[in-house]
Image (cartoon, helix red, strand yellow):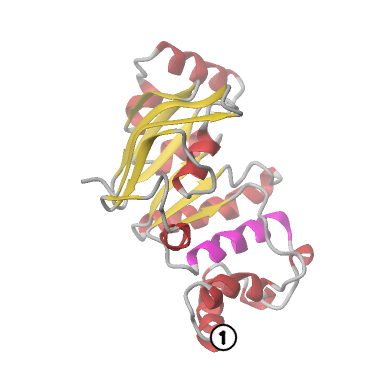
Amino acid sequence: MALVEIRDVRKTYGGVVPVLNGITLDVEEHQVVCLIGPSGCGKSTLLRCINGLEGIDGGEIRLHGDRVSGPGVDLDALRRDVGIVFQSFNLFPHMSVVDNITAAPIKVLGLGRKEARERAMELLARIQLDKKADEFPDRLSGGQQQRVAIVRALAMDPIVLLLDEITSALDPELVSEVLNIVRDLRQEGMTMVLATHEMGFAKEVASKVCFLYGGVVHEEGPPAEIFSDPHDERTRSFLQRIIEAGRL
């Protein structure tokens, strides 16, 4: 049994525009699954459905064998287990860095303020931002804000971490400091699903790469196979454009 099981998941907006057209995908424990494909192919929507931020119109999502989609699902419990980091950081601007990180563990997990702060400071020290704990987000660079956003998700001790284009809003020189955290998490065995346009990074860190097009997984496999010898014509065409743009 896979850690995350996605079966024939469908999603439309307004009952008209199909975004996910029957996604079926397994994510094994400790895997890093990279979702690639053109803009609008459904990558971000799929992540939001896994986390329960978007409802689905058909199919099923399971975590550890338990259904986590559809009516009656405890969304608070789901989001304790499945963390998500967005491309736009989404830090609370009126709260300090450490308060951003401790808010959910205190409110949702019931941790004491002292314990939550100690945990937050440990995590910040890992990314060399403990000295910024009492700063507000607008005093940080984009790369620093995104690293804090990742730490905020990790503070909930999730089973699965979803990363939605986490470098797309960053200046090129800030990308590496964020990707280094993902490399470290991979080494530690964190199960992750990434939607990304960073093809070189996907090739490096992924256990499995899935190419999405039109809301369907057209091809999946190990990165060496997908990037070097794709079988699907749409995958080949997409990667050829990536290569021509100098991004792989």
Q: Name the residue under label 1.
A: 113
- Which stretch is magenta? 141-154
Q: Which residue is drawn at 66% across and 77% down?
A: 131
Between 134 and 112, the one nearer to me in the picture: 112
Q: In this view, does 194 lie above or below 110?
A: above
Q: Which quarter of the figure has residue 172? A: top right
- Residue 29 horizontal/vertical position (percent): 29, 51
Q: In this view, does 85 lie to the left or right of 134?
A: left
Q: Does the magenta stretch include residue 143?
A: yes
Name the magenta segment's main secondary structure.
helix
**Picture coordinates of residue 241 (x, y %)?**
56, 17
Q: Look at 59% across and 47% down and name the residue there.
A: 166
Q: In which quarter of the image is residue 38?
A: top right
Against 181, is 197 above or below?
above
Task: Name the residue at 51% across, 48% down.
Answer: 163
Residue 164 appears at what percent x and percent y? Answer: 55, 44
Q: In the rendered picture of this protein, how many numbered marks are placed on residues?
A: 1
Q: Give the residue at the far top of this rendering.
A: 233
| Disc 1 element | helix
Can residue 170 be found in the magenta stretch?
Answer: no
